[in-house]
Image: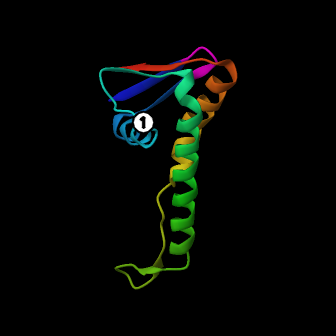
Amino acid sequence: MLITFKCHACPDVMMLENLAQYLVGIVGKRLGQRGVITHDELGPAIEKLEAAITSDKQERAEHEGHFHEGEDGRDRHEIPPGLAQRAYPFLDMLRAAQKENADIVWGL
């Protein structure tokens, strides 16, 4: 299921429910039928998401260089997209909303 985040300060951001639940959880909210991140909550929300992205980047950097041998004996090293790649549209929305003192809302 897709979740659409809306804010008058920027275009809508759509993402799969599991990613939305994860990102909303990072900023201290719960993904329910409807929800809101008020303009007063945006500063701490941005800080939490930026900290999570930094932590993820550090963990991924530590993992760099660890190769895993594939079934055919060749080295395989496929790393799925990191939190930064998946979270930036949402983080950009948070920042845009903060600049405009706007709330972000979502509904299923």
Q: Amino acid at mark 1?
A: Val
Q: The C terminus appears in which quarter of the rendering?
A: top left
Q: The N terminus appears in which quarter of the rendering?
A: top left
* Quadrant position of residue 10: top right
Residue at the limit of the structure toward the top, as seen here:
8
| Kind of element beneath mark 1 | helix
Residue at the limit of the structure toward the right, as seen here:
99
Residue at 57%, 61% in the rendered image = 57
Residue at 62%, 23% in the rendered image = 97
Colouring chosen for the image of the structure: rainbow
User: Can residue 108 be seen at all in this image of the molecule?
Assistant: no
Residue 107's x, y, as percent? 37, 18
Total numbered circles: 1
Residue 22's x, y, as percent? 39, 42
In this view, 87 is above or below 77: above
Residue 48's x, y, as percent? 52, 45
Q: Nearer the viewer, residue 84 or 79?
A: 84
* Quadrant position of residue 4: top left
Crowd around label 1: few <14 · some 14–19 · many ≥20 (10 Å): some
Give the main secondary structure of the magenta stretch.
strand
Which residue was labeled with disc 1? 24
Query: Is residue 48 rendered magenta in the image?
Result: no
Range shown magenta = 7-11
In this view, 85 is above or below 35: below
Residue at 38%, 28% in the rendered image = 2
| 35 relative position to 89: left or right | left
